Image (cartoon, rainbow, N blue to C red):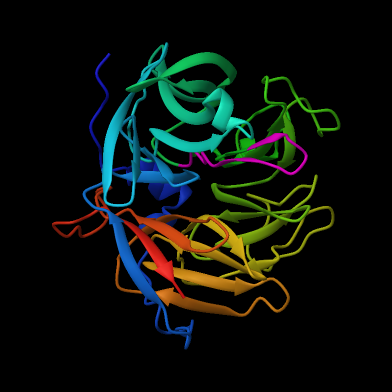
Amino acid sequence: MINRKWSIPCSLAVVLAGCSETTTEDPSKSVPKTSEPVESNIIFKNLKIPWNIEKNQQTFYITEREGTIVKGTEGKYSRMELELTEPVVAEGEGGLLGMALDPDFQKNRTAYVYHTYEKEGALWNRVIEITEETESWKEQRVLLDEIPGASIHNGGRIEIGPDGLLYVTAGDAAVPENAQKLSSLSGKILRMNLDGSPAKGNLREYVYSYGHRNPQGLVFVDQTLYATEHGQSGHDEINRIEQKNYGWPLIEGTEKQQGLVTPWYEVGENSVAPSGIAEQGGKLYFGTLVGQSLRSIETSTTKVEQLVTDQGRIRDVMTDGQHLYYVTNNTDGRGNPSDEDDVLVRLDP
């Protein structure tokens, strides 16, 4: 099967469900730019719709939505193909998305990825274990499949927590009511062991939390899990995740209802479409797509500032404890790419 090329996803389904990645926003109106001096250096150029950044020692691994993994050190990289039992389908917001390196990656060369595939004419997502070989990655086993997919709202971020468990975001796949059904994997944050079995103590089998629309970022700060989430029209969220119901589609923004969680932080009426998120020095750093900026938010005060506003759409951000790194997403069909896009950038505060 040949991977599908990028398609414009704002179809009738998007009109019905909302398309926060394409809502217009002027980021200068409400969020100040940081006064801290920040220098940046481009590490890689001409990436193809990158989605997730991982780093092992000095080597970067970056997923590209059409089904390749970029591997390289500063200034030099190559593309590695994936040998899979189900080919990656890069349709709309789907494709090869999240990636997490095994805690023992240096020895076992094992990683976990989330990708979209097609089965009997329908789109699905799955989480698989892969191992790095000389010039490619090879699928070893399926951890979880038949996560509902669509051309929008696939979620796709994965993170290994301090408890050694794998956390996975799944969007509502444009069927909002499924986010409230514990019997569905849609609109959830999922939790499992690294062998793919459900983690003990989940709300139901794989379900850790529910009532999510399209969560696209995960990060642990000590034992606290934070997640970014796209709102329907504005009201994007950052949540502190517990085993609770986060309300979609029953409530959004600052709305309250008994038994449902109101966001720890929400952006208000103008969407910014937050995606990848990282933590460093008491702040969360998150990329925004519509907001076309890299932003920080203090965990103690929720004060938000913009660090980068001149690189277009920003999909993911990560830290190695010393530097911040981010990837742009200007080649995804919704941005205005330059000749160098997309890029991996290092920030040197």
Question: Does the stretch in magenta take in 336?
Answer: no
In the figure, is residue 42 to the left or right of 36?
Answer: left
Residue at the image point whose x is 27% and y is 55% from the top: 330
- Residue 290 in sight in this render: no
- Residue 222 in sight in this render: yes
- Picture quarter containing residue 5? top left
Q: How many marks?
A: 0
| Residue found at the very far bottom of the displayed protein | 35
- Picture quarter containing residue 292? bottom left
In the figure, is residue 217 to the left or right of 84?
Answer: right
Residue 179 picture location, percent across and down: 64, 39
Residue 279 picture location, percent across and down: 61, 62
* Quarter of the picture holding the N terminus: top left
- Specify the segment rendered in magenta: 153-167
Q: Nearer the viewer, residue 318 or 84?
A: 318
State whether the magenta stretch is mostly helix, strand or loop. Answer: loop
Compared with 275, 31 (above or below) is below
In the figure, is residue 14 to the left or right of 267?
Answer: left
Compared with 82, 201 (above or below) is below
Residue at the image point whose x is 65% and y is 68% from the top: 265
Q: Nearer the viewer, residue 221 or 183?
A: 221
Residue 43 picture location, percent across and down: 31, 56
